Image (cartoon, grey):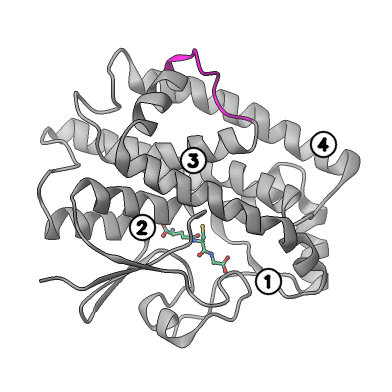
Amino acid sequence: MTSLVLYEHPLSPYAQKCKIALYEKGVDFTAKIPTAIGTGQVDPDFLAASPRGEVPALVDGDFPVFDSTVILEYIEDRFPAPPLLPRDARLRAKARMIEDAMDTLYEPINWGLGELRWFKRAEGERARVIEARAAGQARDFYAWLERQLGDGPWFCGDSFGWADLSVIPYINGSTGLGIGPSVSSKLGQWQARANARLSVSKTAAAATESIQGMALVGEAVKQRLFKREYRDHRLEWMIRSGGLDVVLEGLKADTIRFSNEFK
Ligand SMILES: N[C@@H](CCC(=O)N[C@@H](CS)C(=O)NCC(=O)O)C(=O)O
């Protein structure tokens, strides 16, 4: 008997990876959205499981696991059937490389567009410059992803697995933001195949539903109720994609935070 709690947010691609894996394996879990996520002042129970104050975090009984990659590894070890990582050493490495590229290089493209459109970090010409960079970066990434797909139905063999579940949250996110791949492209066709799986469609439907709530967050940033985490690849992306002013203004207004002090 397991008692699994997944701290998540439906829009977090990192959390979506873990939900898809749990659904694929038919493992029961309780999903919880931490109180005040995104404000920089999350609840203590959640912080105990995730000292970085980030979703996802998985709590298996009394054992907490944070970071989506570590959580995926844990899910695979703890619930081996059906396997999501291929057997072959090269394909395993390929799946992990694709996951890493999506998590660290692709993710900030969608995240940055969210900072502009939902959190209203820039408007007018300033926003257009950053948006154009994001759209171009996504297009280039799609060419790389299509090379990874080759002629196969899935990224690493004949069945849906680790690499696919690590890519689909991001590509669906980009489609929602209007910069997704064309439906007739190789990647667009893969996207349709992935979205036909129940594990993915349930996860994507929850994300779409939670977008409604984002209409109000721009105002919340102005009132300093949100303190968004700009760290690692996100901070770098905003600066290298034309948003140095966004970072400086957010720091001045105290609506941006970096990593938590680790306690
Ligand atoms: N490397 C981490 C990244 C997790 C992450 O960045 N989560 C974001 C949501 S997508 C978060 O919880 N941010 C906290 C905040 O904005 O306060 C992982 O793979 O789990």
The residue singled out by tag 1 in the image is 227
Q: Are marks 2 and 1 in contact (CB under 8 Å)?
A: no
Q: Nearer the viewer, residue 189 or 162?
A: 189
First in sequence: mark 2 vs mark 3: 2
Instruction: Write down the quadrant of residue 230 in the picture.
Output: bottom right
Specify the amino acid type for callout 1.
Lys
Specify the amino acid type for callout 2.
Ser
Mark 2: secondary structure: helix
> Residue 157 location, x and y as percent?
20, 25
Quadrant of image for the C terminus: bottom left
Asked if residue 9 lies in the magenta stretch, the reply is no
User: Magenta stretch mostly in which secondary structure?
Assistant: loop
Mark 3: secondary structure: helix
Q: Nearer the viewer, residue 99 or 154?
A: 154
Looking at the image, residue 206 lies above or below residue 52:
above
The residue singled out by tag 3 in the image is 170
Q: Nearer the viewer, residue 86 or 214?
A: 214
Mark 3 surroundings within 10 Å by alpha-carbon count, few (fewer than 14), some (14 through 19), many (20 or more):
many
Measure the C-alpha gap from mark 2 to mark 3: 14 Å
First in sequence: mark 4 vs mark 3: 4
Residue 68: mark in rendering: 2
Measure the C-alpha gap from mark 3 to mark 1: 23 Å
Q: Nearer the viewer, residue 129 or 90?
A: 129
Magenta range: 179-186
Residue at (43% x, 78% y) in the render: 51
